[in-house]
Amino acid sequence: MMDNKNVKIGIYGAALLMMGVIGVSGSLSTIAASFPNASQTMVQNIVSIPCLVIIPVTLMVGRLMAFISKKKLMLTGIGFFIVGGVVPAFLDSLPLILVFRGILGLGIGLIQPVASALVAENYQGPEQERVQGAMTSYQMLGCAVMVFVGGWLGARAWNLSFYVHLLGIISLMMVIAFVPDQKPVRKEATDAPHLKNRLTLSSWRWAGMMFLFFIAGQIYSVYTAFLVTEKALGTAVQAGNSLAFFALGGFMMGLLFGRLVSLARQMTLSMGFFLLGISYLLVAFANSMTVIYIGSIICGLAFSTAMPCIIINTAGSVDHFSVGMAISITMCAQNLAQFISPMIVNPLLAAISSGNPNQMAFILGAVLITTLGVAALFWGTGQNKKAAQTG
Protein backbone atom coordinates (compact mmCIF):
# COMPACT_ATOMS: atom_id res chain seq x y z
CA MET A 1 0.00 0.00 0.00
CA MET A 2 1.33 3.43 -0.92
CA ASP A 3 2.29 5.96 1.75
CA ASN A 4 -0.09 8.78 0.83
CA LYS A 5 2.08 11.45 2.43
CA ASN A 6 5.10 10.45 0.37
CA VAL A 7 3.02 10.13 -2.80
CA LYS A 8 1.87 13.72 -2.30
CA ILE A 9 5.46 14.94 -2.34
CA GLY A 10 6.19 13.08 -5.57
CA ILE A 11 2.99 14.39 -7.18
CA TYR A 12 3.87 17.96 -6.24
CA GLY A 13 7.37 17.51 -7.65
CA ALA A 14 5.96 16.38 -10.99
CA ALA A 15 3.37 19.17 -10.91
CA LEU A 16 6.16 21.76 -11.01
CA LEU A 17 6.56 20.89 -14.70
CA MET A 18 2.94 20.52 -15.77
CA MET A 19 2.67 24.09 -17.09
CA GLY A 20 6.11 23.97 -18.68
CA VAL A 21 4.56 24.60 -22.10
CA ILE A 22 4.33 28.31 -21.25
CA GLY A 23 7.72 28.51 -19.51
CA VAL A 24 9.18 30.68 -22.28
CA SER A 25 5.97 32.58 -23.12
CA GLY A 26 7.30 35.80 -21.64
CA SER A 27 10.13 35.73 -24.19
CA LEU A 28 8.00 35.14 -27.29
CA SER A 29 8.27 38.72 -28.52
CA THR A 30 12.08 38.59 -28.08
CA ILE A 31 12.24 35.27 -29.94
CA ALA A 32 10.07 36.76 -32.70
CA ALA A 33 12.54 39.64 -33.08
CA SER A 34 15.34 37.10 -33.54
CA PHE A 35 13.42 35.38 -36.35
CA PRO A 36 12.05 38.37 -38.32
CA ASN A 37 10.96 36.22 -41.29
CA ALA A 38 8.68 34.08 -39.12
CA SER A 39 5.03 35.02 -38.66
CA GLN A 40 3.54 35.65 -35.21
CA THR A 41 1.59 32.38 -35.49
CA MET A 42 4.83 30.52 -36.31
CA VAL A 43 6.51 31.91 -33.18
CA GLN A 44 3.41 31.11 -31.10
CA ASN A 45 3.87 27.50 -32.21
CA ILE A 46 6.69 27.35 -29.65
CA VAL A 47 3.80 27.10 -27.17
CA SER A 48 1.28 25.41 -29.46
CA ILE A 49 3.37 22.53 -30.89
CA PRO A 50 3.94 20.84 -27.51
CA CYS A 51 0.18 20.95 -26.96
CA LEU A 52 -0.37 19.14 -30.27
CA VAL A 53 2.05 16.37 -29.29
CA ILE A 54 0.47 16.01 -25.85
CA ILE A 55 -2.87 15.03 -27.43
CA PRO A 56 -2.02 11.51 -28.69
CA VAL A 57 0.38 10.95 -25.79
CA THR A 58 -2.32 11.52 -23.16
CA LEU A 59 -4.59 9.03 -24.93
CA MET A 60 -1.78 6.49 -25.05
CA VAL A 61 -0.94 7.02 -21.38
CA GLY A 62 -4.54 6.32 -20.40
CA ARG A 63 -3.97 2.75 -21.59
CA LEU A 64 -0.32 2.42 -20.53
CA MET A 65 -1.22 3.11 -16.89
CA ALA A 66 -2.98 -0.27 -16.83
CA PHE A 67 0.31 -2.06 -17.66
CA ILE A 68 3.26 0.15 -16.63
CA SER A 69 3.91 1.64 -13.21
CA LYS A 70 3.05 5.30 -12.87
CA LYS A 71 6.52 6.02 -11.51
CA LYS A 72 8.22 4.71 -14.67
CA LEU A 73 5.86 6.72 -16.88
CA MET A 74 6.47 9.86 -14.85
CA LEU A 75 10.27 9.52 -14.85
CA THR A 76 10.26 8.96 -18.60
CA GLY A 77 8.15 12.07 -19.03
CA ILE A 78 10.51 14.18 -16.94
CA GLY A 79 13.46 12.96 -19.01
CA PHE A 80 11.76 14.06 -22.24
CA PHE A 81 10.85 17.38 -20.58
CA ILE A 82 14.49 18.17 -19.73
CA VAL A 83 15.85 17.19 -23.17
CA GLY A 84 13.09 18.84 -25.20
CA GLY A 85 13.15 21.96 -23.04
CA VAL A 86 16.88 22.66 -22.82
CA VAL A 87 18.26 21.63 -26.25
CA PRO A 88 16.60 24.60 -28.10
CA ALA A 89 18.99 26.88 -26.19
CA PHE A 90 21.74 25.58 -28.49
CA LEU A 91 19.82 25.88 -31.79
CA ASP A 92 19.41 28.71 -34.28
CA SER A 93 16.76 27.09 -36.49
CA LEU A 94 13.12 27.77 -35.60
CA PRO A 95 11.83 24.56 -37.29
CA LEU A 96 14.38 22.50 -35.35
CA ILE A 97 13.43 24.30 -32.15
CA LEU A 98 9.82 23.30 -32.80
CA VAL A 99 10.91 19.65 -33.16
CA PHE A 100 12.41 19.70 -29.67
CA ARG A 101 9.39 21.56 -28.35
CA GLY A 102 7.46 18.54 -29.56
CA ILE A 103 9.72 16.33 -27.41
CA LEU A 104 8.93 18.63 -24.48
CA GLY A 105 5.25 18.04 -25.22
CA LEU A 106 5.84 14.30 -25.17
CA GLY A 107 7.22 14.63 -21.65
CA ILE A 108 4.37 16.80 -20.36
CA GLY A 109 1.87 14.45 -22.02
CA LEU A 110 3.23 11.66 -19.84
CA ILE A 111 3.38 13.71 -16.65
CA GLN A 112 -0.05 15.42 -16.64
CA PRO A 113 -2.46 12.46 -16.66
CA VAL A 114 -0.26 10.28 -14.46
CA ALA A 115 -0.06 12.92 -11.71
CA SER A 116 -3.83 13.54 -11.81
CA ALA A 117 -4.52 9.79 -11.82
CA LEU A 118 -2.32 9.37 -8.72
CA VAL A 119 -4.42 11.97 -6.92
CA ALA A 120 -7.71 10.29 -7.87
CA GLU A 121 -6.30 6.86 -6.98
CA ASN A 122 -5.01 7.73 -3.52
CA TYR A 123 -7.39 10.37 -2.15
CA GLN A 124 -11.15 10.74 -1.83
CA GLY A 125 -13.63 13.45 -0.86
CA PRO A 126 -12.34 16.62 0.83
CA GLU A 127 -8.80 15.21 0.95
CA GLN A 128 -8.84 14.75 -2.82
CA GLU A 129 -9.98 18.35 -3.25
CA ARG A 130 -7.14 19.57 -1.01
CA VAL A 131 -4.49 17.51 -2.79
CA GLN A 132 -5.82 18.46 -6.25
CA GLY A 133 -5.79 22.12 -5.23
CA ALA A 134 -2.28 21.83 -3.80
CA MET A 135 -1.12 20.11 -6.99
CA THR A 136 -2.42 23.11 -8.92
CA SER A 137 -0.46 25.36 -6.56
CA TYR A 138 2.74 23.52 -7.38
CA GLN A 139 1.93 23.73 -11.10
CA MET A 140 1.70 27.47 -10.69
CA LEU A 141 4.84 27.61 -8.54
CA GLY A 142 6.81 25.85 -11.28
CA CYS A 143 5.24 28.13 -13.86
CA ALA A 144 6.17 31.21 -11.80
CA VAL A 145 9.78 30.14 -11.54
CA MET A 146 10.05 29.34 -15.25
CA VAL A 147 8.35 32.44 -16.64
CA PHE A 148 10.06 34.84 -14.23
CA VAL A 149 13.54 33.43 -14.78
CA GLY A 150 12.78 32.85 -18.48
CA GLY A 151 11.77 36.47 -19.03
CA TRP A 152 14.88 37.68 -17.19
CA LEU A 153 17.16 35.41 -19.21
CA GLY A 154 15.32 36.14 -22.48
CA ALA A 155 15.98 39.87 -22.08
CA ARG A 156 19.70 39.07 -22.25
CA ALA A 157 19.56 36.57 -25.11
CA TRP A 158 16.49 34.86 -26.53
CA ASN A 159 17.98 31.36 -26.34
CA LEU A 160 18.92 31.61 -22.65
CA SER A 161 15.23 31.47 -21.70
CA PHE A 162 15.15 27.74 -22.52
CA TYR A 163 17.46 26.96 -19.59
CA VAL A 164 14.47 27.32 -17.25
CA HIS A 165 13.55 23.72 -18.10
CA LEU A 166 16.44 22.52 -15.95
CA LEU A 167 13.85 22.75 -13.17
CA GLY A 168 13.02 19.21 -14.28
CA ILE A 169 16.10 17.94 -12.42
CA ILE A 170 14.48 18.85 -9.09
CA SER A 171 11.26 17.12 -10.12
CA LEU A 172 13.21 14.05 -11.19
CA MET A 173 14.78 13.71 -7.74
CA MET A 174 11.44 14.20 -5.95
CA VAL A 175 9.69 11.52 -8.00
CA ILE A 176 12.57 9.07 -7.59
CA ALA A 177 12.51 9.57 -3.82
CA PHE A 178 8.78 9.66 -3.07
CA VAL A 179 6.72 7.79 -5.69
CA PRO A 180 6.77 3.99 -5.19
CA ASP A 181 7.41 1.87 -8.26
CA GLN A 182 4.14 -0.02 -7.84
CA LYS A 183 3.00 -2.29 -10.65
CA PRO A 184 -0.62 -1.94 -11.80
CA VAL A 185 -2.92 -4.39 -10.04
CA ARG A 186 -4.05 -7.17 -12.36
CA LYS A 187 -7.25 -9.02 -11.54
CA GLU A 188 -8.13 -12.60 -12.30
CA ALA A 189 -9.47 -13.55 -15.70
CA THR A 190 -12.95 -13.99 -14.21
CA ASP A 191 -12.92 -10.29 -13.44
CA ALA A 192 -11.74 -9.32 -16.94
CA PRO A 193 -15.01 -7.60 -17.95
CA HIS A 194 -14.48 -5.14 -15.09
CA LEU A 195 -11.10 -4.07 -16.51
CA LYS A 196 -12.58 -2.27 -19.50
CA ASN A 197 -12.53 1.52 -19.60
CA ARG A 198 -16.11 2.75 -19.53
CA LEU A 199 -16.47 6.42 -20.37
CA THR A 200 -19.78 8.11 -19.64
CA LEU A 201 -21.63 10.90 -21.43
CA SER A 202 -20.83 13.09 -18.44
CA SER A 203 -17.08 12.45 -18.82
CA TRP A 204 -17.25 13.57 -22.46
CA ARG A 205 -19.11 16.71 -21.40
CA TRP A 206 -16.34 17.57 -18.96
CA ALA A 207 -13.78 17.04 -21.70
CA GLY A 208 -15.80 19.43 -23.87
CA MET A 209 -15.86 21.97 -21.06
CA MET A 210 -12.09 21.75 -20.71
CA PHE A 211 -11.73 22.27 -24.48
CA LEU A 212 -13.81 25.46 -24.51
CA PHE A 213 -12.12 26.71 -21.35
CA PHE A 214 -8.67 26.46 -22.94
CA ILE A 215 -9.70 27.94 -26.29
CA ALA A 216 -10.14 31.10 -24.23
CA GLY A 217 -7.51 30.29 -21.59
CA GLN A 218 -4.64 29.93 -24.07
CA ILE A 219 -5.08 33.55 -25.08
CA TYR A 220 -3.31 34.66 -21.93
CA SER A 221 -0.30 32.43 -22.57
CA VAL A 222 0.40 33.42 -26.17
CA TYR A 223 -0.84 37.00 -26.45
CA THR A 224 0.36 38.69 -23.24
CA ALA A 225 3.96 39.27 -24.39
CA PHE A 226 2.73 40.65 -27.72
CA LEU A 227 0.17 42.90 -25.96
CA VAL A 228 2.87 44.35 -23.72
CA THR A 229 4.96 45.11 -26.83
CA GLU A 230 1.93 46.38 -28.81
CA LYS A 231 1.12 48.93 -26.10
CA ALA A 232 4.80 49.72 -25.41
CA LEU A 233 4.27 48.98 -21.73
CA GLY A 234 7.47 47.03 -21.13
CA THR A 235 10.06 44.51 -22.26
CA ALA A 236 10.40 40.73 -22.17
CA VAL A 237 11.30 41.04 -18.49
CA GLN A 238 8.00 42.77 -17.68
CA ALA A 239 6.07 40.31 -19.85
CA GLY A 240 7.74 37.46 -17.99
CA ASN A 241 6.87 39.12 -14.69
CA SER A 242 3.20 39.27 -15.69
CA LEU A 243 3.19 35.52 -16.21
CA ALA A 244 4.93 35.12 -12.85
CA PHE A 245 2.13 37.14 -11.22
CA PHE A 246 -0.34 34.85 -13.00
CA ALA A 247 1.39 31.88 -11.44
CA LEU A 248 1.46 33.57 -8.03
CA GLY A 249 -2.30 34.04 -8.13
CA GLY A 250 -2.72 30.41 -9.14
CA PHE A 251 -0.44 29.25 -6.34
CA MET A 252 -2.45 31.13 -3.71
CA MET A 253 -5.80 29.82 -4.96
CA GLY A 254 -4.48 26.26 -5.11
CA LEU A 255 -3.81 26.42 -1.38
CA LEU A 256 -7.32 27.78 -0.72
CA PHE A 257 -9.19 25.60 -3.22
CA GLY A 258 -10.41 22.95 -0.77
CA ARG A 259 -11.90 25.58 1.53
CA LEU A 260 -13.51 27.42 -1.39
CA VAL A 261 -15.21 24.25 -2.64
CA SER A 262 -16.54 23.48 0.83
CA LEU A 263 -18.24 26.89 0.83
CA ALA A 264 -19.32 27.36 -2.80
CA ARG A 265 -19.67 23.68 -3.78
CA GLN A 266 -20.71 23.38 -7.44
CA MET A 267 -20.79 27.16 -7.89
CA THR A 268 -16.98 27.13 -7.73
CA LEU A 269 -16.56 26.51 -11.47
CA SER A 270 -18.69 29.49 -12.50
CA MET A 271 -16.71 31.67 -10.09
CA GLY A 272 -13.50 30.65 -11.84
CA PHE A 273 -14.90 31.47 -15.26
CA PHE A 274 -16.20 34.89 -14.21
CA LEU A 275 -12.87 35.74 -12.58
CA LEU A 276 -11.09 34.88 -15.83
CA GLY A 277 -13.42 37.14 -17.82
CA ILE A 278 -12.72 40.03 -15.44
CA SER A 279 -8.96 39.47 -15.65
CA TYR A 280 -9.04 39.49 -19.46
CA LEU A 281 -10.85 42.83 -19.56
CA LEU A 282 -8.35 44.33 -17.11
CA VAL A 283 -5.43 43.17 -19.28
CA ALA A 284 -7.11 44.28 -22.53
CA PHE A 285 -7.62 47.86 -21.35
CA ALA A 286 -4.51 48.19 -19.19
CA ASN A 287 -2.51 51.37 -19.58
CA SER A 288 0.34 50.34 -17.28
CA MET A 289 2.20 47.22 -16.23
CA THR A 290 0.66 47.57 -12.76
CA VAL A 291 -2.79 46.91 -14.20
CA ILE A 292 -1.37 44.03 -16.28
CA TYR A 293 0.05 42.52 -13.08
CA ILE A 294 -3.28 42.86 -11.24
CA GLY A 295 -5.10 41.24 -14.14
CA SER A 296 -2.49 38.48 -14.22
CA ILE A 297 -2.96 37.66 -10.53
CA ILE A 298 -6.73 37.42 -11.01
CA CYS A 299 -6.17 35.29 -14.10
CA GLY A 300 -4.07 32.88 -12.03
CA LEU A 301 -6.75 32.76 -9.34
CA ALA A 302 -9.28 31.90 -12.04
CA PHE A 303 -7.23 29.09 -13.58
CA SER A 304 -6.60 27.46 -10.21
CA THR A 305 -10.32 27.63 -9.47
CA ALA A 306 -11.66 26.23 -12.73
CA MET A 307 -9.06 23.58 -13.61
CA PRO A 308 -9.30 21.47 -10.43
CA CYS A 309 -13.11 21.63 -10.65
CA ILE A 310 -13.06 20.11 -14.12
CA ILE A 311 -10.53 17.40 -13.20
CA ILE A 312 -12.40 16.40 -10.02
CA ASN A 313 -15.73 16.24 -11.82
CA THR A 314 -14.13 14.24 -14.63
CA ALA A 315 -12.79 11.70 -12.12
CA GLY A 316 -16.19 11.50 -10.44
CA SER A 317 -18.05 10.88 -13.69
CA VAL A 318 -16.67 7.34 -14.25
CA ASP A 319 -15.89 4.19 -12.28
CA HIS A 320 -12.58 3.85 -10.42
CA PHE A 321 -10.81 1.81 -13.12
CA SER A 322 -11.77 4.30 -15.88
CA VAL A 323 -10.49 7.40 -14.05
CA GLY A 324 -7.08 7.31 -15.77
CA MET A 325 -8.57 7.17 -19.26
CA ALA A 326 -11.22 9.82 -18.50
CA ILE A 327 -8.59 12.23 -17.18
CA SER A 328 -6.37 11.48 -20.19
CA ILE A 329 -9.18 12.42 -22.57
CA THR A 330 -9.90 15.61 -20.65
CA MET A 331 -6.19 16.51 -20.80
CA CYS A 332 -6.27 15.70 -24.51
CA ALA A 333 -9.13 18.17 -24.94
CA GLN A 334 -7.16 20.78 -23.01
CA ASN A 335 -4.08 20.46 -25.18
CA LEU A 336 -6.03 20.28 -28.44
CA ALA A 337 -7.61 23.60 -27.46
CA GLN A 338 -4.21 25.07 -26.58
CA PHE A 339 -2.86 24.05 -29.99
CA ILE A 340 -5.70 25.33 -32.15
CA SER A 341 -6.58 28.44 -30.11
CA PRO A 342 -4.20 30.77 -32.05
CA MET A 343 -5.39 29.22 -35.33
CA ILE A 344 -8.95 30.19 -34.45
CA VAL A 345 -8.26 33.51 -32.76
CA ASN A 346 -5.72 34.98 -35.23
CA PRO A 347 -8.02 34.76 -38.30
CA LEU A 348 -10.84 36.26 -36.25
CA LEU A 349 -8.57 39.11 -35.19
CA ALA A 350 -7.52 39.71 -38.79
CA ALA A 351 -11.18 39.99 -39.77
CA ILE A 352 -12.45 42.25 -36.97
CA SER A 353 -9.43 44.20 -35.69
CA SER A 354 -7.52 46.84 -37.62
CA GLY A 355 -5.44 48.52 -34.94
CA ASN A 356 -4.90 46.51 -31.76
CA PRO A 357 -5.26 42.80 -32.53
CA ASN A 358 -3.70 41.55 -29.29
CA GLN A 359 -6.03 43.71 -27.24
CA MET A 360 -8.99 42.36 -29.20
CA ALA A 361 -7.82 38.80 -28.48
CA PHE A 362 -8.39 39.38 -24.77
CA ILE A 363 -11.80 40.93 -25.41
CA LEU A 364 -12.84 37.89 -27.45
CA GLY A 365 -11.57 35.61 -24.69
CA ALA A 366 -13.58 37.53 -22.10
CA VAL A 367 -16.77 37.10 -24.14
CA LEU A 368 -16.27 33.34 -24.55
CA ILE A 369 -15.32 32.62 -20.94
CA THR A 370 -18.15 34.75 -19.56
CA THR A 371 -20.59 32.75 -21.68
CA LEU A 372 -19.18 29.56 -20.15
CA GLY A 373 -19.54 31.16 -16.73
CA VAL A 374 -23.26 31.74 -17.27
CA ALA A 375 -23.73 28.11 -18.33
CA ALA A 376 -21.72 26.89 -15.32
CA LEU A 377 -23.79 29.15 -13.03
CA PHE A 378 -27.06 27.49 -14.08
CA TRP A 379 -25.49 24.01 -13.80
CA GLY A 380 -23.98 24.71 -10.39
CA THR A 381 -27.22 26.16 -9.01
CA GLY A 382 -29.10 23.04 -10.09
CA GLN A 383 -26.48 20.70 -8.63
CA ASN A 384 -26.45 22.50 -5.28
CA LYS A 385 -30.27 22.33 -5.08
CA LYS A 386 -30.18 18.59 -5.78
CA ALA A 387 -27.55 18.08 -3.09
CA ALA A 388 -29.64 20.07 -0.58
CA GLN A 389 -32.74 17.98 -1.33
CA THR A 390 -30.93 14.65 -0.98
CA GLY A 391 -28.81 15.77 1.97
Image (cartoon, rainbow, N blue to C red):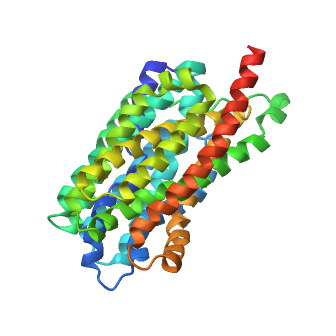
Up-down relation of residue 71 to residue 361 (above or below):
above
Residue 349 appears at what percent x and percent y? Answer: 49, 74
Q: Nearer the viewer, residue 319 or 353?
A: 353
Up-down relation of residue 268 to residue 143 (above or below):
above
Residue at image location 71% in from the left, 42% down from the top: 203
Residue at image location 50% in from the left, 31% down from the top: 132
Q: Quadrant of the C terminus?
A: top right
Q: Nearer the viewer, residue 168 or 297?
A: 297
Quarter of the image where one finds residue 233? bottom left
Residue 116 appears at what percent x and percent y? Answer: 54, 37
Quarter of the image where one finds residue 381? top right
Q: Nearer the viewer, residue 375 or 36?
A: 375
Residue 147 appears at what percent x and percent y? Answer: 29, 52
Residue 159 appears at what percent x and percent y? Answer: 23, 67
Residue 186 seen: no
Residue at image location 85% in from the left, 29% down from the top: 190
Quarter of the image where one finds residue 175? top left
Residue at image location 84% in from the left, 35% down from the top: 193
Q: Residue furthest left?
A: 156
Q: Is residue 47 left or right of residue 163?
A: right
Q: Residue furthest top?
A: 391
Q: Quadrant of the N terminus?
A: top right
Up-down relation of residue 39 to residue 337 (above or below):
below
Residue 315 seen: yes
Q: Is residue 294 left or right of residue 308?
A: left
Q: Is residue 32 left or right of residue 121?
A: left
Up-down relation of residue 39 to residue 58 (above or below):
below
